[in-house]
Image: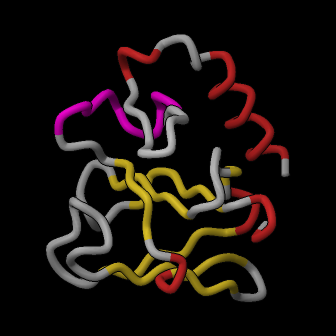
Amino acid sequence: MTSVAGVIATAAALQNVSAFAHSTDSGWTYPPACCHGDLVAGECGRIPSITVTPQADGYVIILRPGDHRKVTHQNRYFVPYDSVIPSGDDNFHICLHPTQEHENCFFAPSEAM
């Protein structure tokens, strides 16, 4: 849980640096460290909950084209529970950077954590 707390603290400290982040459809802003300031294409986006499967030690996420704006072919990601960041709404979100094969940040609703 230490790494999640560190990410949350960093995100809170950088919350006012909105020029380097983009916002979700529901209005909260992704931490700048997650989206690398790509306001046009946006590395971060909401993903369907059906793409996320909890396992014993973390989440398995399988994204197909249409699930996220950067995904052009099926990709599988694994995110350990201690790397999950609470989302600012009731949805799952993922940031893919530098390519669609690389999960940079993963957000889960609080009830899913």
Question: Relative to residue 88, is residue 78 drawn left or right?
Answer: left
**Secondary structure mostly seen in the magenta stretch:** loop
Q: Residue at x 65, y 59 (%)?
A: 90
Residue 58 highlighted magenta (yes or no): no
> Residue pushed farthest front?
26
Question: Which scheme is used to colour this image of the protein?
Answer: secondary structure
In the picture shown, does residue 96 fall above or below 22?
below
Question: Relative to residue 67, is residue 1 drawn left or right?
Answer: right
In the picture shown, does residue 82 fall above or below 27?
below
In the picture shown, does residue 3 fall above or below 58?
above
> Residue pushed farthest right?
1
Q: Quadrant of residue 39?
A: top left
Q: Which residues are magenta?
A: 31-40
The mark total stands at 0
Q: Residue at x 55, y 35 (%)?
A: 28
**Position of residue 104 measured from the top left corner of the image (x, y, whole percent):** 45, 52
> The C terminus is located in which quarter?
bottom right
**Position of residue 89 measured from the top left corner of the image (x, y, whole percent):** 63, 51
In the picture shown, does residue 110 fall above or below 15?
below
Residue 32 highlighted magenta (yes or no): yes
**Position of residue 34 measured from the top left corner of the image (x, y, whole percent):** 46, 40
Q: Quadrant of residue 100?
A: bottom left
**Position of residue 41 measured from the top left corner of the image (x, y, whole percent):** 18, 43
Report the front residue among 5 and 40.
Answer: 40
Q: Residue at x 43, y 59 (%)?
A: 46
Question: Relative to residue 62, is residue 31 drawn left or right?
Answer: right
Q: Quadrant of residue 108?
A: bottom right
Question: Relative to residue 13, is residue 103 drawn left or right?
Answer: left
Q: Residue at x 35, y 61 (%)?
A: 102
Report the front residue among 102 and 94.
Answer: 94
